[in-house]
Image (cartoon, rainbow, N blue to C red):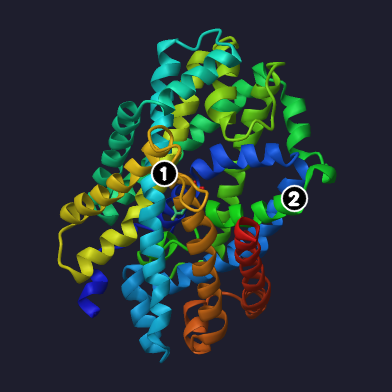
Amino acid sequence: MEDKKKMHGTWASRWTFVLAATGSAVGLGNIWKFPYIAGENGGGAFVVVYLFCILLIGLPIMVAEVMLGRRGRLSPINSMRLITTESGLHGVWNGIGWLGVVAGLIILSYYAVIAGWALYYILEMASGSLHGATAEQASALFSKLQADPQRLIFYQSIFMLMTIAVVAGGVTRGLGVAVRTLMPMLFVLLVIVLVFSYREGEFSRGLEFLFNFNTEALSGEGVLEAMGHAFFTLSLGMGAIMAYGAYMPEHARIGTTVLAVGALDTLVALMAGMAIFPIVFANPVLEPGAGPGLLFISLPVAFGNMPGGLLFGTIFFVLVSVAAWSSAISLIEPAVAYLVESHKLNRLTANLLLGGIAWLTGLGTVFSFNIWADYKLAGFTFFDFLDFLSSSVMLPVSGMLIALVVGWYMKPGVVQEELADETPTVFNCWKTVLKYISLASVAAIFVIGIYKTFG
Ligand code: PFF
């Protein structure tokens, strides 16, 4: 195994790790999903619950995941093998690595389809076709896109090629260079859209909506949604963060690094909300609780009817695409690293193979919006089924196993050694929260989620 440890290379610095992990974390989850679920759950109170979930469930598990990766220094599958052997644990714990790798590919398969919508909207915005659009016209445009498999496949394919092109370049020259370019770009674009929203939108109404503590609109379901989303938005339980942890420099402090990633991810989600709601409120016919159509129907209408809106709308969809791109590369990397280590494939072949599998699976998602829309599996369309399987089953199960193995089963000395730079108080706090609060919460998300669906 020793020589395998050097085969992928490491991040140029701790800062590159922060950018890479933030790139993974900040994605469609922050810019598409967070604003619309916050909107559906009434805003402020949901945001507070979400922040607690990040702090008490997300960050402790993220520390555990980075720690496992850095200890193993290999793909999640082989890192887990090494760690279970070192701590004399049963091989069943290796399942954590497999779950992560497979879940990553499943998510990538549909993530590429949705990211493809964002690519399509860059062109639609730039072409001016949405100038002065009414809600009906924007809704018809979105329906037309969804009903057209060829167009969906075209954009899905472009996005998948963009993803494998980066990952084929390797850790230092591919992923590292990409995140050092894309993340500052994402931030600048977000600030530009935010300034536009401040100047042209109903900024104070947007802020009030996002930060006003309105408990009435928050249901038990909303709390559950906040918990699940905290997990998804930080890219936990899918091997992505573990794989990235494996490329972290030896002496970087995990605790503060993870804190930086969590803070940046939350900042981007809040900034996205602060940019989007004032723009939506600027148009009297639009609703903040519009659901998944918030980004692809409401916003295009809002942009299309504002001065300078087409330019800023185009910038906005470039922003969404960049965010999705830097997340997608982290979804395929764990599986690529595994094939390179264990099956002696070169990076390009591994990428083509895995990208091809994810692309093929993605066709099911494409068709679930049109020709397969009526085929249901246990009441789910193909896309809903994959989303349920990955986000509501594989992800919490993997999170529970990570909290269990790090909190309860690994040799305490090993855990302590990897986190030796933390003060004893920080270390003890983290471990206690992980062992009890994070573990119990993820278990609850899982059980209640399954019960709600099938019970
Ligand atoms: N965190 C990403 C988002 O919020 O869009 C999605 C994601 C990326 C989930 C990578 C999991 C992952 F491994």
Residue 422 horizontal/vertical position (percent): 57, 74
Residue 243 horizontal/vertical position (percent): 37, 64
- State the SS at label 1: helix
Q: Is residue 2 above or below residue 37?
A: below
Q: Is residue 224 above or below residue 81?
A: above
- Mark 1 C-beta to ligand 1 under 8 Å: yes
Instruction: Tell me the crowding category of disc 1: few under 14, some 14 to 19, or many 20 or more residues within 10 angstroms, Cα based.
Output: many
Q: For the residue marked with disc 2, what is the amino acid? A: Val
Looking at the image, the residue that sits furthest to the bottom is 88
User: Which residue shows up at 64% across the image and 62% down it?
Assistant: 451
The quadrant where residue 339 appears: bottom left
- Label placed on residue 111: 1
User: Which residue shows up at 52% across the image and 83% down it?
Assistant: 416
- Label placed on residue 379: none
Q: Quadrant of the N terminus?
A: bottom left
Location of mark 2 (residue): 48
Q: Nearer the viewer, mark 1 or mark 2?
A: 1
User: Which residue shows up at 35% across the image and 64% down it?
Assistant: 247
Q: Is residue 118 above or below residue 11?
A: above
* Gap in angstroms between the C-alphas marked 1 and 2: 27 Å
Q: For the residue marked with disc 1, what is the amino acid? A: Tyr
